[in-house]
Amino acid sequence: MLRLTWVQPEDLIGHELHQATQDGREPSAVKARWKAAGGKEAPLRAGASPEPASRYLRQLAEDLLDELADLPSRLADSEPTSLAKIKASCPAWPTQPAGTRATGPTQPAGSGPAGPTQPAGTRATGPTQPAGSGPAGPTQPAGTRATGPAQPAGSGPAGPTQPAGTRATGPAQPAGSRAAGAAPDPKKGGGTPQALASDPTPAATPTQARLEAAWLGRAVGCLLGKPVEKLPLQAIRALAQSTGNWPLNTYFTARGVPTQLLTQHPWNRRSASTSLAENIDGMPEDDDLNYPLLNLLLLQRHGKTFTTTDVATLWLDELPAGRTFTAERIAYRNLLTGLEPPRTARHRNPFREWIGALIRADVHGWTNPGDPAAAAEQAHRDATLTHTANGVYAAMFTAATIAQAATGTADIHTALRTGLTVIPPASRLAKALTHAIQLARTHDDFDTVVDELHATHAPTHHWVHAIPNTALIAAALTHADGDFTGSICRAVSGGWDTDSNGATAGSIAALLAGSPAALPDHWTTPLKNRLATTIGDFNGTGFDTLAHLTHTLTHLEAPRP
């Protein structure tokens, strides 16, 4: 019997009831009707319940999903999805660097094509350069931790820099231990000076080497998290501890894990054969890499003035439906039934504030160095195909953070503060990020940070929801001072959506590192400069080639007739 995940109405209704409670609606009457009819709770970790519902329950679930969608939300004013309203609610929205021009479409997203496009399936090519070619820009040394509550971005000049691409001489910091050179105790004064939103970072194209590091970092972080995706926090800790890999500092392995422990907590069944240390042979396919590849195609075909409709068309042309999950699968289904953006994000889509839009944000940041506003606006047009409110904010925050990091002149704390300037300060995500960053600055032991985050979010949020996962990413990067190994290991060791969190933390930390040479060999060598995918003709492509293609898009304008 086929039980297609993430689309069955009887499974969606339970998730929508949780979503309604979180976003300020009052679903108790609808919940009572569903329970009285014999309806069940949403599956805790799987995408579908094992048995189909009766025809009556399925029809009731569809009707109740529509009723829930019509309920008013008390958070509607503080958590808008419209870009204009988001910008109006952000007092420190970053200004664009001098000499740049707005990249958004002149029509509302989804109102029509953005001019002629290339035929589906084509993509720009060109000579590639050797891995690591070109001088890397300067980066700030790890260990310059800021303290105190998060402030808006742009806070003055960064400290002394060292050449990007230089490898740290000391051992990598394992997850859980505070990086050397941490800032003063926030309880004893000090802290981060307040930023000025009117001081944008001058636009500077990141070197191809820096972009290659970012692609590699995204892949490594994803690969680290793949075997433990969906596992509870205590299982992740127990599996790593059983092989002496705690605090986490390298890929997971099954060698030495007691049989009883593996029986109780088996590896992710889809990933173990390609992502445990003894099995890695190149980068296996994962949606955390597929979506950045799709966004390369998006910018090649439409430039930075793409619309949400362009994103939808590209997906139908290039993205196999079976490679979509949660909000993306719902939106894909909605497109096939004739709905148009942005309704595709709202119609019977209880996953619209989950992590799917965040994992699509990197390319928007990589290609807008020093222009976090443009990066956030691009991420918004992409995200609103599938997400609303905090699901969209997570993508905007990530894109803006990456855009700031891509200049090579900002440390991780400045980059994260920049990310906070593009999301509504009264939103649940902004509050969760501020809390997470403060926890990371306060506690020396990262396990304590993780335990507090889980105590705060786990009782009310699904393990794929954007709010707890984005908060964990920010905490990991903050606690590790942007160190690559420290950041990815903290992000993955914190649980929840481990491969996505590792991927985003790895992308940002590697971007700050500046070049592939700055990433420890034990992480990158097993990837063999090769990526597997079903997107376009990218299967088998090297990360140096992906960096070259990304580099050509950093100042790309829209195609003209």
Image: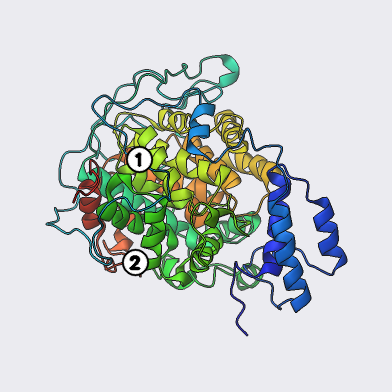
Q: Extreme top residue here?
A: 189
Q: Amino acid at mark 2?
A: Ile
**Which residue in the structure is indicated by mark 1?**
106
At 61% from the left and 30% from the top, the residue drawn is: 426
**Which residue in the structure is indicated by mark 2?**
535
x, y (%) of residue 457? Answer: 67, 45
* SS assignment at label 2: loop
Q: Nearer the viewer, residue 371 or 246?
A: 371
Q: Extreme bottom residue here?
A: 1
Image quarter for residue 370? top left
Q: Quadrant of the N terminus?
A: bottom right
Residue 522 showing in the rendered view:
no
Task: Please state if 123 lies on the left or on the right of 484 as rendered.
Answer: left
Q: Nearer the viewer, residue 143 or 286?
A: 286
Mark sitting on residue 482:
none
x, y (%) of residue 135? Answer: 16, 38
Q: CA distance from mark 2 to mark 1?
A: 29 Å
* SS assignment at label 1: loop
x, y (%) of residue 469? Answer: 56, 47
Graded by Cα atoms within 10 Å as few (under 14), some (14 to 19) or many (20 or more), the crowding at tag 1 reads few
